[in-house]
Amino acid sequence: MRRVHRVRRTLNYANLSTPLGLLVARLGHARVTAGPDGLILAYGYRFRFPIARAFTVGNVVLTKYEEGYLTGSLLRHEGRHASQYMLCVGLPMLLLYLVATAASMLICWDRAAWNVFERLANLEDGNYSRKSPWWRRARRTSR
């Protein structure tokens, strides 16, 4: 494991975001396994919230799907979110992410397209699409 991933893993434990992620995985009856780059993969998450193919809390990447689902670009996308938890000093990331989601909804009526955290994690890797702000779409349709 690279040094940056060891640091991320350590800081996300210290800032309590990874312990919260493990608690969420346990409450959601997910099966936990070690993943690459210090990530912890949790498969079979049973709750319907949040609405996403996968989501990250600290270094814990959760999905409702079976083992083997978290690979490639999706796993890289979620790994970037783990780094964002580290940079946001853990739990404040949850509030900041909600604010970014609300801003994205106001800009383009989509929870991810203008969410700064999703954009920095590479929208396409998370299977999100880019969308124009509503005012640009309104201007195009009025011409």
Image (spheres, rainbow, N blue to C red):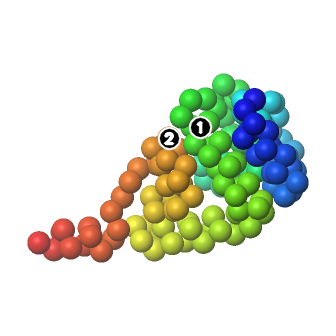
**Residue under circle 1?**
76
Tag 1: amino acid: Arg
* Extreme residue toward the left, this view: 143
Q: Are marks 2 and 1 in contact (CB under 8 Å)?
A: yes
Could you say where residue 98 lies in the image, as x and y percent from the top left?
A: 63, 68
Q: Is residue 55 left or right of residue 57?
A: left
How many residues crowd mark 2 within 10 Å: few (<14), some (14–19), many (20+)?
some
Q: Nearer the viewer, residue 137 or 2?
A: 2
Disc 1, SS = helix
**Residue drawn at (88%, 54%) of the image:** 14
Q: Quadrant of residue 72?
A: top right
Relative height, residue 103 to residue 2 (above, below): below
Is residue 95 in view from this perspective?
yes
Q: Is residue 138 left or right of residue 13?
A: left
Q: Which mark is residue 125?
A: 2
Q: Nearer the viewer, residue 18 or 52?
A: 18
Is the N terminus in the top left, top right, bottom left or bottom right quadrant? top right
